[in-house]
Image: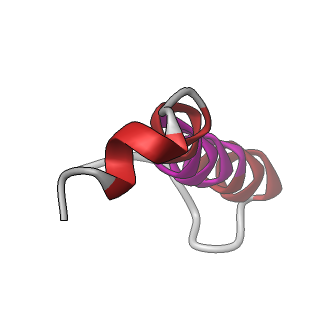
Amino acid sequence: MLFAVKPGDPWNLSAVFIFLIGVSLGAAWQPSHRAANLDPARALGHD
């Protein structure tokens, strides 16, 4: 629980927004990076 934080505080809203953008970019980057480094012929051979 945060004390002395108002619901519309612009600093906290921007910090949370930047944090959530960073988490979402990290969550999207990791699988796309793995897929980009995968050999397509090897991936199709496992079917």
Residue 28 in the image: state x and y as whole percent: 55, 52
- Residue 37 in the magenta stretch? The answer is no
Colouring chosen for the image of the structure = secondary structure
Magenta region, residue range:
18-30
Residue ID at (57%, 72%): 7
**Residue closer to the observer: 36 or 47:** 47
Determine the residue positioned at 47% across, 44% down: 41
Looking at the rendered structure, the number of numbered marks drawn on it comes to 0
Q: Is residue 11 above or below residue 44?
A: above
Q: Looking at the image, is 42 positioned above or below residue 47?
A: above
**Relative to residue 4, is residue 14 drawn left or right?**
right
* Image height of 39 relative to 27, above or below: above
Q: Work out whether residue 29 or residue 6 is closer to the camera in this orientation and state it.
A: 29
Residue plotted at (36% across, 57% down): 44
Which of the 4 image quarters holds residue 42? top left
Image-based side of 27 in relation to 20, left or right: left
Residue 38 locus on image (x, y percent): 48, 33
Give x and y (percent) for residue 30.
47, 36
Classified by dominant secondary structure, the portion drawn in magenta counts as helix
Residue shown at the point (77%, 51%) measured from the top left: 14
In this view, the residue farthest toward the bottom is 7
Q: Which residue lies furthest to the top in this view?
A: 37
Q: Where is residue 3 in the image (x, y as percent from the top left)?
A: 36, 46
Instruction: Please state, as top left, top right, bottom left or bottom right, where the C terminus lies in the image.
Output: bottom left
